[in-house]
Image (spheres, coloured by chain):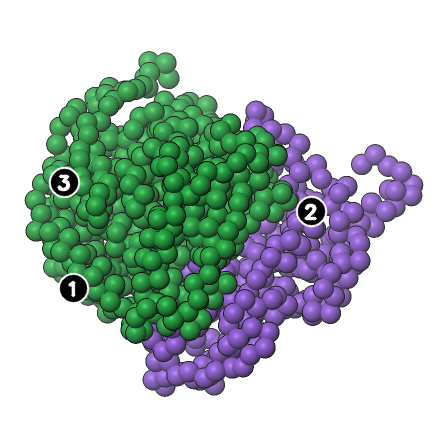
Chain colours: A green, B purple
Amino acid sequence: MPVDIKIEQHKTDVLVLGSGGAGLFGALHAKAANPDLEVTVAVKGLLGKCGCTRMVQGGYNVALAPGDSVERHFMDTVEGGKWINRQDLAWTLVEQAQVRIRELENELGCFFDRNPDGTVHQKAFAGQTFDRTVHKGDLTGIEIINRLAEQVWARDIKRMEDHRAVALIPAKDGSRIAGVLMIDMRAGIFRMVRAQSVLLATGGGPTMYKYHTPSGDKTCDGMAMGIRLGLTLRDMEMVQFHPTGLIAGEDTRITGTIIEEGLRGAGGYLLDGNGERFMHKYDERGERATRDIVSRGMFQEMRTGTIAKHGGLYITMKHLDPTMVKKNFKGMVERCGDCGFDLVSGNVEVVPTAHYMMGGIVFEPDCKTEIPGLYAAGEDTGGVHGANRLGGNGVANSTVFGGIAGDTIARETTPGAPLVEPDQSAIDEAIQLCCKPLNRPPAQIDQVRTKLWDHMWEDAGIFRDAESLARAKATLDDLDGELDTIGVADTNLAYNLTWHDWINLKNLILVSRSVVAAATAREDSRGAHFRADFPDVRDLENSTYTVVRMKDDKITLGTEPVDFTIVKPGETLIDETAA
Amino acid sequence: MSNTIKVSVWRGQTEGAFEDFEVPRQPSQTVLDVITYIQRNIDPTLSYRFACRVGVCGSCAMTVNGRPRWTCRTHVDKVATDGTLQVSPLRNLEVVKDLACDMTEFFNKMNRAEGKFHPTKSRDDDFDMVLPDDPKRKQASQGIECIGCGVCYAACDVVEWNKDYLGPAALNRAWTLVNDVRDGGNAERIAAVSGDGGCHACHSQQGCVEHCPKHISPTHSIAGLKRAVAKSALKGIFGGDD
C-alpha cells in the first residue's frame, strides 16, 4: 500500500455512535443510570454540531394539553403512517414523549416557548388533529441539541470527535457485538473501539438524492453498516420528500435545504418558470395540500411544464404584506438574503427535496436489535413512523428512543467487564473496503456522486414505476463498480475529505440499493411511496411491510404482514363520546 | 462579474502557507461553495469542516478576508469586493489541518463557565409557568440562540492574550442561565465566572458583538455578569436572602 495503514486499539464499556438527539440521550441516560460505566460518544464531526436533530425547525409532538391524549397522538401517527407502523413502537413514542419533553425542559434546561399565561405553547402542525407541537421559535433543534451537548460536556463522558464508524464488528464466535471499527479522521488512522454495548444512532439522511435537506455529513452510514452486518431493515422504500428546498445552481451547498412549509400555509404561491400558479391543477387545496401531494405536483410540473433557470419552480410571497413576511419568517428571509435571494419581494427558486427516511433497522421497543449488545435508536431505525412521518415526530422519535436505549444499555452493561474478542476477519474486510481507493490512481469521484444523485432523483424518488426502478437497480450496480475503479490521493490521510467522500458514496450506493429493492416490491402507493403503475392504496386490512437484508453481497427482499397489535384499520382508540 | 475568483487558502497547521486557486464564479455562491469547489475539482486534499449548510450548526466558521464568518451563509459578492478571497482557519483555536480547527477548548470553556442548566425539578413535574414578557425571560432569550460557532471567540483579542479567558460565548451562556428562573446553579456559576479568566477579563472591545452572525451581544451579557458578581459579593459581605 502506498501509505501506512495504522490501526490503534481502544476500549470502553459503552460506545455511542452519533451525537444527535438519539446519541446524546443514549449517552446521558446510560451514564445517569450507572455512573460507573465508561461511556464514549463518537461522532463524524463535532459533538452536537453535525447531524440533523439540530436542524429541526418545527418542534416536538407531544400530547400535553387538556383534550389531547396519547391515544389521539397515536392515531394521528398511525393514520399518517398509512397503517404500516409497528404499533408497539408508535405507542412507545407517543407515551414516552410526555416524559421526555418534561425531562428536556425541567432537567436539561430547554426553554420552550410559552403562551401569554406562562404555560407551554403548542402549535399546529400538518396532519394532526390537535395543536401539540412544543417548540422554541423555529429553531427548536438548536435549543435541544445545545442543552444536551452542554450536559454531556459537564459529565465524565468520553468524546471522540471527527471519528467516523466504518464497520460494526461482531465477536469472533458471532455471539454478540464486539465493537466498532472507526476512522480517526483527524489522524487518518483506523481505530478499533471494543465495547460491551454499542448504540447505533448515526441518523439516516437520504443524501443519495440530487436534492436533499439533511446535514452534509449524513450519508446513511449506520444503515450501511447494519446491512453489511446482516441486519434486517424495514420500510426502506419510504423516503419523505419536502416540497420546497432551495435551488441555487450547480456546486452550491445550500441547494436542497428547506424553505419552510409555513410560507405556503401563510399564503405563499408556487409558480412555474413563466410565473404562473399551477398547484390547482393537482389538488383543489392548491399550495396548501399535504407534503406528498405538493411534492408530486411540483415534480410533475417540472417534467411537463415550464421550469425556472436552475430546473426548479418558484415560491413567492410578494403578493403578501411584506411586514408580515419579514416578521413571521425572519430566519428564512435572512437565510435567503445571505445567499442572494429576495424572499419578501422576489421569486425564490425551489424544488422538492429528500428529507427523511422512515425505514431503517428493525429494532424492539427497548432498542435492542437482532445482535446482542447492539442497540439502535433514531433515524437509523424503522417501524415507528410507517409510511410517512408527521412533522414533529422526528425529534420525538430520536429523543424518546435514545433515552430508552441508554436505560437498556445501563441494565445490560457491567462497568469494566471483560470484552469479547472481535472477529479479525471482519476487521480486515472492512479495512480492505475502506482502503480500496487508496491503491488506485486518483480520479474525480464527483462524477459518481452526480450520477447517483440524478438517477435516484429521476428513477427512485417522488414517482416510481417498475421500469424506472429496474433502471435504477442496474445503474446502482454500475455505479458501485465504477466507484471501485476510482482512486483517491493518499499521500496524507489526515482529514482527507475526498477519501471520506468515497466511503460516503460507497454507503449511499448500498443503502440506495435497498431503497430500490423495497420500492420495487411494494406494488401499491401509500404515504411517501408513489408507484405510477400502482397509484392506489391496496386494502389496509391486509397491509404488509417490506424487509431487506444482505446475503452474499445480494440484497434479499421479503414482505411481512403488519400485525395490528393495538388498533385495526377502520377502528380508533379515541373515545369521541368522552370528549 | 469576472468569470473567476482568486482564492488564497491556508494550507498546513500552525505552520503553513497560503496557496492560490482560481475558481469559477457562480451567481449564487457562498465562500463554502468556493472551498468545496477547490476540494472537489482542483485539490482533493484540502481539509475543511462543514455540516448543516444553512447557519444552524456553526461547523464551517473560518476567517474570510480577515474576519471570522460562517462560510455557508457568506455570499462571495459580499466579501470579495476586490475580486479576491483569502480564507484561513478561525483564530484562537488549534488548527487540525488547513481550514479545520479543534474546538475542544472552546467547548470545555462553556462547561467551565457553568454554562449548563442546573435543574430544580424533574421529569415527573409539570412545566414551570414562565411569562413570555417577564424581564428575566426576555434577558435569557436575548442570548439563548447562540449556536456555538466560535466566531466571537475568534474575534476576541482578550482570548488571544489570555488563554484562560472563558470567552464571549461561554460567558453569554452563563448570563442566559443567570436569568433563567428555573435554574438552581447560580452560586456555582457566579463563582465560575468571577475568577481570573471570567467576566472581569473582558475589556468591552466588542469584537464579539460586531461579528456575531446571530446579532447577539456577548458584551451586554458580560456586563450583566459583572453586575451579578458585584451584587453577589455585596451579599456575601452584608448578607441577604434574595
For mark 1, name the chain.
A
Nearer to us in this view, A324 or B6: B6
Q: Work out whether residue A245 can be spotted.
A: no
Mark 2, secondary structure of its residue: loop
**Distance of label 1 from label 3 (alpha carbons):** 33 Å
Q: Name the residue located 83 percent from the left edge and 47 percent from the top edge.
A: B231
Nearer to us in this view, A145 or A172: A172
- Residue A532 in the image: above or below residue A162: above
Other-residue count near label 1 (Cα within 10 Å), few / some / many at <14 / 14–19 / ≥20: some
Asked whether the residues under marks 1 and 2 belong to the same chain, the reply is no
Instruction: Provide the residue designation for mark 2.
Output: B114
Q: Name the residue located 29 percent from the left edge and 54 percent from the top edge.
A: A508
Q: From the viewer's perspective, is the residue at label 2 or at label 3 nearer?
A: 3
The percent coordinates of residue B228 (x first, y second) are 78, 48
What quarter of the picture does the N terminus of chain A occupy?
bottom left
Q: Name the residue located 30 percent from the left edge and 39 percent from the top edge.
A: A231
Relative to B68, B120 lies left or right: right
Instruction: Provide the residue designation for mark 3.
Output: A521
Picture quadrant where residue A289 is located: top left
What quarter of the picture does the C terminus of chain A occupy?
top left
Nearer to us in this view, A399 or A62: A399
Instruction: Provide the residue designation for mark 1.
Output: A306
Inspect the image, locate mark 3, and give the three-letter code of the amino acid beneath it: Ala
Q: From the viewer's perspective, is the residue at label 1 or at label 2 nearer?
A: 2
Relative to B93, A92 lies left or right: left
The percent coordinates of residue A357 (x first, y second) are 30, 44
